Image: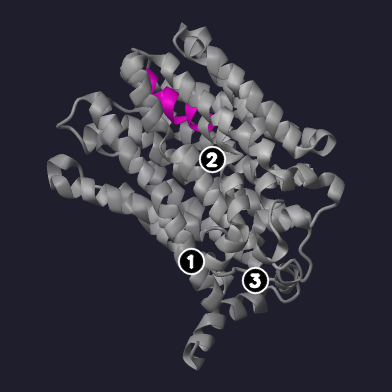
Amino acid sequence: MSAGQALGSGAVEHDARQINARHTEVAPGEIAIGVIIGRTSEFFDFFVFAIAAVLVFPALIFPFADALTGTIYSFLIFALAFVARPFGSLIFMAVDRNYGRASKLTAALFLLGTSTVGLAFLPSYADAGVWAIILLAVFRIGQGLALGGAWDGLASLLALNVPEEKRGWYAMVPQLGAPIGMIVASGLFAYFVSTLSAGDFLDWGWRYPFFVAFAINVVALFARLRLVTTPDYAKLFESRALQPTRVIPTVKKEGRSIIIGAFAPLASFALFHMVTVFPLSWIFLFTREVPSRFLLIEAVAGAFGLGAIIVSGYLADRIGRRYLLGISAAAIAVFSGFAPQLLDAGNVGEIAYMVVGFILLGLSFGQSSGAVASNFSGSARYTSSALTSDLAWLFGAGFAPLAALLLASEFGLLAAGGYLLSGAVLTLAALAINKELVGKN
């Protein structure tokens, strides 16, 4: 690295550390707050796009297709972010090594904010033709690349910087961002859908949540920079060997654990979409129910999921993460057998499906990051955890709404239950063969 590069690489972090010079201790509570804010920002972006992929993009971007086909096209573009995410990790890991973590986070969250606000100004197919589809895909890829770069290692740092007997409790903290982001996104869309006419909503109402997402990204950036620029944070990362390593040597060293770690949370990641994106698309396409009502059901069920995540921290510290993940995966497998019937059983069935599904999701999803973070050697933990997270989301979540909708529309809801069952089986298999995870729990 040249002298000029070195000067530029440290400028951002130097200025920020001067601001934080008096703040030298990073307590677990502060790390937890930074983690929650960061994850809430990411998941809010995620759910805003997911909801728009069902309610907006089929009509606005794919008006030439029927509703089902348009939704399938939207879900294909939805998946692009998960395909791009590992590449974002590779790109921004290099930025981290050469220019520092503050520079990496600033660049990644700037890209995320730019891509998100770009979606707010997305033209319709009627106005821009095929360019509307291209722009939608480009902005979605931008979001995926940015999410790969937004990995800050805070979750790993949090898990390592707490007492051994509280590892499970603090491991669930990063996962709280998922239900919080979903509740806010669902409530926001429910408000606009219920108060605006269909024409106004498709014309301009749907764009406001994307502006909100941009504002939350700004808050998340400063919350994270406040932590990563403190001297004590840097010392903790150095002492814990949580530094970015080159990908190829890391994969050679930790490849087995990365693959097993990617498959271990598949049950929760498959269920993640089976209680969020997929049921919304099914209700919207195949029932006469008002979307705003189901969005509110999702928000309320998300509160149950939030509570279940908290409970997972308590349980994990008493029975172990591995056992909790295994029990949750088995419960999800059982749930897959009758979940489709609940979703197709009217209002009461829908509520039962969502509440039970979110409770199971909270118990399993609450410890998925903890299991991943504890699985790697110190020198490779930062990069290995990032790659494992990317692959887990790609395999377990990226194509889940698309696969579930295709299966359900072609073979009925029972087939969607089969997809969920496959995720549970893979999780149980990964846990069974992961001797390292057994030993550490």
Say if 263 sits above or below 151 in the image.
above
Q: CA distance from mark 1 to mark 3?
A: 17 Å
What is the CA distance from the residue labelled 2 to the residue labelled 1? 24 Å
- How far is the residue under mark 2 from the one under mark 3? 26 Å
Give the residue drawn at x 20%, y 35%.
Answer: 62
Tell me the crowding category of disc 1: few under 14, some 14 to 19, or many 20 or more residues within 10 angstroms, Cα based: many
Position of 151 with respect to 172 (left or right) is left
Q: Residue at x 50, y 38 (%)?
A: 396
Q: Residues within 10 Å of mark 2 (few under 14, many from 20)?
A: many
> Relative to 82, does residue 97 appear above or below in the rendering?
below
Mark 3 nearby-residue class (10 Å; few <14, some 14–19, many ≥20): many
Magenta-drawn segment: 271-283
Name the amino acid, label 1: Phe
Q: Position of residue 294 (x, y in %)?
A: 45, 20
Quadrant holding the C terminus:
top right
At 50% across and 44% down in the image, what residue appears? 393
Viewer-proximal residue, 268 or 107?
268
Q: Position of residue 320 (x, y in %)?
A: 79, 37
Pick whichever of labels 2 and 1 is earlier in the sequence. 1
Tell me the amino acid under the disc marked 2: Gly
Q: Position of residue 18 (x, y in %)?
A: 66, 79
Q: Which residue is mark 1?
A: 92
Numbered mark located on residue 438 in the image? none
* Left or right, residue 135 beside residue 250: left
